[in-house]
Amino acid sequence: MTCQASNELEQLVLQARPYSSQGKLATYIPALEKANPSHLSVAIFHLDGTCTYAGDYKQRFSLQSISKVLSLAYVLARIGDEEVFQRVGMEPTGDPFNSIAKLETTKPSKPLNPMINAGALVVTSLIPGADLKEQWEDFLDFIRTLTGNPEIAYNKELQESEFSTSYLNRALCFFMKQHGIINGEVEKIMELYTKQCSIEMNCLELAQLGAVFANNGRNPVSGEQIIPVQIARICKTFMVTCGMYNASGEFAMKVGIPAKSGVSGGILGVIPNRCGIGVFSPALDEKGNSLAGWKLLEFMNEKYNFSIF
Ligand code: DON
């Protein structure tokens, strides 16, 4: 991989960094509070295999909700869309990512989409495997293949921190178990889910993984079809309509690319047939999106005009 520092991107990072002081670190997962709120990094991975980066590009961070796109792609590929969409819908929601409200009022009762916590917990419950170990190892292998890094791992301290405080996610699981939307043991689903959320990478690896989606599921370097074309398309569609939670409409207006954020401050961006983008800055706005990360993408769009609309 040929990766180079970019002066042009560095200028945009300089312009966006001050916004990080207006955001706040996520605190409901205790270990996330340890992040440095002024960090900001970006990488772009082009489909010709070259990449550029700027800012604190070596900094590793956990995927959190970005992992929802990856578990969705994995489960769709392994068990097929019919089984998945019986249990989770395709519509955006105006509610916060961890809201329980619509579960009770939607008929038949199922989460509105796989990008909110309820929907992602359903998807995780569908990860196939004989036991938790096999489920986790096979899924992690998939992430390693996507990033081209066989050493990708999860952060145990972070995982334990979330696992021991996830009362709301457990509540979502129990509600859905009562209504027959999920099967299996809630504690096992929670373990798998908190592990996937705690997978760590840097912005370069995130950008490389984004390039696979940008390249319709095919690894731009090796040419290997890692995700079927149709599944890559489903994921990108969800990223546009639901990827930035209840700010997805505004993000589509201001940046205009499939994207997925996480409460660690990471944002995965995909510009179809062009490149993958990885951004990280841990200070968040009130909806849980990275504040400086979002601003940086806005500045990048102004400069490179990458909105798909
Ligand atoms: O389940 C949770 O609450 C976290 N592990 C992930 C949430 C998240 O990243 C939402 N992002 N904006």
Image (cartoon, rainbow, N blue to C red):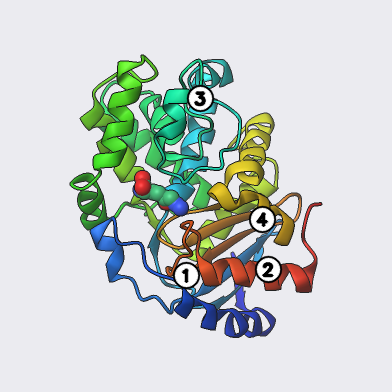
The tag on residue 281 is 1
Where residue 163 sits, quadrant-wise, is top left
**Camera-side residue of 147 and 301:** 301
Q: Would you say the beta carbon of the disc 3 residue lies within 8 angstroms of ligand 1?
A: no
Task: Categorize mark 3 by other alpha carbons within 10 Å: few (<14), some (14-19), many (20+).
Answer: many
Q: Residues under labels 3 and 1: Cα distance? A: 30 Å
Q: Which residue is drawn at 56% across and 55% down?
A: 268
Res. 250 mark: 4
| N-term mark: 4 or 2 | 4
Instruction: Please say whether residue 253 is visible from this viewpoint.
Output: yes
**Type of the residue with mark 4:** Glu
Check residue 298 in the rendering and tell me which mark sits there, or answer none. 2
Categorize mark 2 by other alpha carbons within 10 Å: few (<14), some (14-19), many (20+): many
Identify residue type, mark 3.
Val
- Single out the mark in the foreground, 4 or 3: 4
The numbered disc on residue 143 is: none
Residue at 42% x, 24% y is 104
| Residue labelled with disc 3 | 88
Q: How far apart are marks 4 and 3 (CA)?
A: 24 Å
**Dot 2: what SS?**
helix
Residue 173 lies, with reference to residue 5, above or below; the image says above
What secondary structure is marked by label 4? Answer: helix
Cα distance in 3D space between marks 4 and 1: 19 Å
Q: Position of residue 247 (x, y in %)?
A: 59, 53
How many labels were placed on the picture? 4
Q: Which of marks 4 and 3 is nearer the N terminus?
A: 3
Viewer-side residue, 193 vs 204: 193
